[in-house]
Each structure stands twice: as structure tokens, then as C-alpha cells.
Image (cartoon, helix red, strand yellow):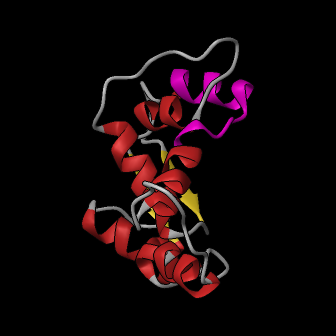
Amino acid sequence: MASQVIEEMGIQLRGRMRDDFLVRRLDLDCRRMKVNVELFGLLRVLRAEATVVIATDNMDCFVRAFERARSRKRRRGEGWVTMADWAAVCDDIISSSEVGALKEDPQAFFGPWLDRHGMTFRD
């Protein structure tokens, strides 16, 4: 988990910063992360006919930022698209930090999500 990594770094914050400042900042940076605009546009079109799911080997901070972005109103960026915009277009996210497996093991990574949604690899 990201908070464990940050804790292991032993960074001492000064001033009025709360203990969770670095975790909150990491989440914010994930939400503001720039994404592939061309792919984003294509997925917006395809979503009318397909389920769009991000499959990632990112840490828990990425999932947290994705879920938070999906639950809030979006503000459009200027000339670029952020992960927060991307989250609104996607139906779900599968992350190795959540499933405990990397994409290199498709059955362990994708299998539980497919089962929950009544799908198979053929779908």
C-alpha cells in the first residue's frame, strides 16, 4: 500500500501539514495525471457498445484516486485530459493491488472480475 511505502520513507513533515499529507498529495497527483487523449476519445465512443474497464498494475493510490474521481463532479482541464476525466468514461477498474495478482496471470487478474459480472474470457 502507498501509505506503507510513504511511512517506510521516514519523511518528517514540518509546519501545519497533517500526517496524511503525502498520501493525499499522491492521490491528487493520480487524479491530475495526464492520459492518452486519442485513446480517451476512442473509448468514449466505444463505451456505447462495450464495457470499458481499466486493467492496471498500479498501487492502491491509483484505485483510490480513480474511485474518488468517479464519485465527484468533473472540471474540464485546459487542452488535456486527466485521469479524473478518464474515470468518468470507464465502467470499472481492475488493479493488481486489489486482486493480488499481476496481469501476467490473466486467470488470477481478470478471472474474479469476469465471474462477478457473469462473463468469461470469451466475452
The residue shown at (64%, 40%) is: 33
Q: Main secondary structure of the magenta part?
A: helix
> The C terminus appears in which quarter of the rendering?
bottom left
Place of residue 28 in the rendered image (x, y in percent of width and height, measured from the top left): 51, 45
On screen, residue 121 above or below 69: below
On screen, residue 49 above or below 103: above
Q: Nearer the viewer, residue 78 or 51?
A: 78
On screen, residue 25 above or below 75: below
Q: Is residue 36 left or right of residue 68?
A: right
Q: Would residue 54 be visible to someone looking at this image?
A: no
Q: Is residue 123 left or right of residue 39?
A: left
The residue shown at (46%, 29%) is: 47
* Magenta-drawn stretch contains 77: no
Place of residue 46 in the rendered image (x, y in percent of width and height, measured from the top left): 53, 27
Q: Is residue 24 left or right of residue 70?
A: right
The residue shown at (43%, 54%) is: 16
Q: Nearer the viewer, residue 92 or 47?
A: 92
Q: The magenta stretch spans which residues?
A: 31-45
Place of residue 3 in the rendered image (x, y in percent of width and height, measured from the top left): 47, 75
Instruction: Tell me the quarter of the picture where residue 35 sits.
Output: top right
Q: Would residue 119 be visible to someone looking at this image?
A: yes
Q: How many marks?
A: 0
Place of residue 108 in the rendered image (x, y in percent of width and height, measured from the top left): 49, 83
The residue shown at (70%, 25%) is: 37
Instruction: Tell me the quarter of the picture where residue 24 sits.
Output: bottom left
Q: Nearer the viewer, residue 107 or 2?
A: 2
On screen, residue 76 above or below 43: above
* Magenta-drawn stretch contains 36: yes
